[in-house]
Image (cartoon, rainbow, N blue to C red):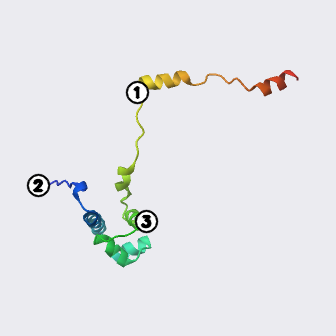
Amino acid sequence: MTEISYINWRSLSDKALAEQIGKFIREKRMEQNKTQDMLSHATGVSRSTISLLENGESVTLSTWLQVLRALDQLQVLDAFIIHQPTLSPIQLAKMELKKRRRARGDETSSSINSNW
């Protein structure tokens, strides 16, 4: 039986959050049967930096993104998607009514055409 645990992210310190990220990276790397050296070569990040990341030490956001990309884990960034509010059918209908139906042309082009 699998146990589902929930983490209260707000209660964690920055260090504890970094450690959780490190555990996630290590777990995904191990699932893919990759060594730290293999991940280092795939990302262009030193093996010692990979080790620091996995141990919950501070690394740059750029490094973290390179590692997520190499591990094909960019979907964790889905939490950062900003969704546009959905419009109700009534709002959509009102917007449709406000759309232009014809072009008027500007005054200068009308006077030029009338001289021809």
Identify which amino acid the numbered label 3 is placed on: Ser
Q: How far apart are marks 1 and 2 (CA)?
A: 43 Å
Q: How many other residues sit within 10 Å of disc 2, few (<14), some (14-19) or many (≥20)?
A: few
The disc placed on residue 34 is none
Check disc 3 and report its element: helix, strand or loop: helix
Residue at which label 2 appears = 1
Q: Quadrant of residue 2?
A: bottom left
- Which residue appears at 76% of the width and 25% of the height? 107
Closest to the camera, between mark 1 and mark 2, is: 1
Residue designated by label 3:
62
107 to 4, vertically: above or below: above
Depth check, front residue: 20 or 78: 20
Q: Regarding mark 2 in the picture, which secondary structure is present there?
A: loop
Circles 3 and 1, Cβ within 8 Å, touching? The answer is no
Examine the rendering and report whether any part of residue 35 can be seen.
Answer: no
Which of the pair 18/89 is nearer the observer? Answer: 18
In the image: residue 36, left or right of residue 1: right
Q: Position of residue 15 (x, y in %)?
A: 27, 66
x 38%, y 58%: residue? 74
Quarter of the figure that contains the N terminus: bottom left
Secondary element at image label 1: loop
Image: 10 above or below 44: above
Local packing at callout 1 (Cα closer than 10 Å; few below 14, some 14-19, many 20+) is few
Q: Label 1: which residue?
A: 88
The amino acid marked with disc number 2 is Met
